[in-house]
Amino acid sequence: MLELLNHPLFWPTLLILVTIVLWATSALPEYLTALLFFAIAMAGKVVPPQTLFSGFASSAFWLVFSGFVLGIAIRKTGLADRAARAISARLTDSWPVMVASIVLLSYALAFVMPSNMGRIALLMPVVGAMARRAGIEEGTRAWFGLALAVGFGTFQLSATILPANVPNLVMSGATESSWGIHLNYLPYLLLHAPVLGILKGLVLIGLISWLFPGHPKPPRGLESPVPMSGDEKRLSWLLAVVLGLWVTESWHGVGPAWVGLAAACVTLLPRVGFINGEEFASGVNVRTCFYVAGILGLAAAVTQSGLGNAVGEWLMSVMPLDPRRPFTSFVALTGITSALNFIMTANGVPALYTTFAQSFSEASGFSLLSVIMIQVLGYSTPLLPYQASPIVVAMALGRVPARHGIKLCLVLALVTFLVLLPLNYGWFRLLGQL
């Protein structure tokens, strides 16, 4: 027993497991669990401070923060209501059509806007205004369904577009640095979009329509267009500049987080911006910011402590990887990714999984590139919301209780693994990837 207590991985593992259980069960508020994780890790010297608090320096944290600020401005100036009026006239005739339009909009925006958090920040105020126009009140099951449509549509479907989310970029970077393989946009899209984009999007629409039923009311009559106010025009120009800089990141090299942070600062400037101090204090959800920082800090702690490597090696030893049973190996590799998702979250999984890709390739008989590509289904299908910070942010902006997010996560994962996984395997084989 003493040897176990003195093992260098014992206390980090215990702390990480307790944190994950608390997040998964919502036994404590998510932000409080994150703060306890920080406090215990520092008091017990379990994780170095530069690792523990790395989430506060990450681009994801500042995208969340700037997303809240921009969302306040979009709602306050009336841009959210204007956009909702423009797109909701014919999209609220039926509940499945309304859900489908939001999922499709979330997916389509991923082709031109590289940041999950940025897309959620822009979409949530518009969807909220659209819901209110359709007679869907905040706090109802239908409202929760629309918020989850934004979160799940933004994160899960964007995994099929190479530059559209953080895990994809981590995988691409790790693949190039570790194995010298450069992933290309169109081949990646062709491999993943038909099953994990289109079919999964249809499944998501069906599940939300079923689990979160709603009865939207079409807007009455045609409203006369109201001229844009000065604040609306100025904010529109600012958002156009932000969107342009996000889309052209590969040219100027300034990350979406820092573009968003600069835009947030502009909206807060006296006489120039749109938000005063009281609105900032009441509108920015600091609890969610701490939660996201905790998730990212936990992922960094798993990597730095060596726990991720230990779990990866153990999974490789117990999973049934066999060149004579390709489908079993395909399922096993997806299972490895899903298991790593519990301790590393989606952003951290590709960094670890990709380093083991050569060993997985030799054990399964798949090519190195195929092994790397198989992980996409696993990390893009979280079993619990905390595994994907964009889903957490959408739930926070929509004030969705944890149990509803967990329910949709589990049901969508069940359908994905039972139905879409075999179809994904068949598509890989049809394209000669296996």
Image (spheres, rainbow, N blue to C red):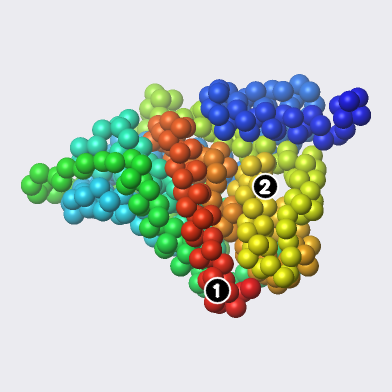
Q: Give the secondary structure at mark 2.
A: helix
- The mark nearer the N terminus, 1 or 2, is 1
Q: CA distance from mark 1 to mark 2?
A: 26 Å
- Which residue is more in the foreground, 8 or 21? 21
Amino acid at the residue labelled 2: Leu
Q: Residue at x 26, y 44 (%)?
A: 130
Checking the image for residue 377, the label placed there is none
Spot occupied by residue 57 in the image (x, y as percentages of width and height): 64, 40
Q: Residue at x 46, y 32 (%)?
A: 403
Q: Is residue 336 left or right of residue 430?
A: right
Amino acid at the residue labelled 1: Pro
Please indicate, yes or no, whether residue 216 appears anywhere in the rendered image: yes
Quarter of the C terminus within the rendering = bottom right
- Which residue is more in the foreground, 111 or 94? 94
Quarter of the N terminus within the rendering = top right
The answer to which image quadrant residue 354 occupies is bottom right
Spot occupied by residue 136 in the image (x, y as percentages of width and height): 24, 37
Q: Residue at x 67, y 41 (%)?
A: 343
Spot occupied by residue 124 in the image (x, y as percentages of width and height): 37, 43
Q: Give the secondary structure at mark 1.
A: helix
Vertical comparison of 89 with 291: above or below: below
Please indicate, yes or no, whether residue 347 appears anywhere in the rendered image: no
Q: How many marks?
A: 2
Q: Is residue 246 left or right of residue 304?
A: left
Checking the image for residue 187, the label placed there is 1
Q: Which residue in the structure is indicated by mark 2?
A: 340
The answer to which image quadrant residue 407 occupies is top left
Q: Nearer the viewer, mark 1 or mark 2?
A: 2
Spot occupied by residue 146 in the image (x, y as percentages of width and height): 34, 43
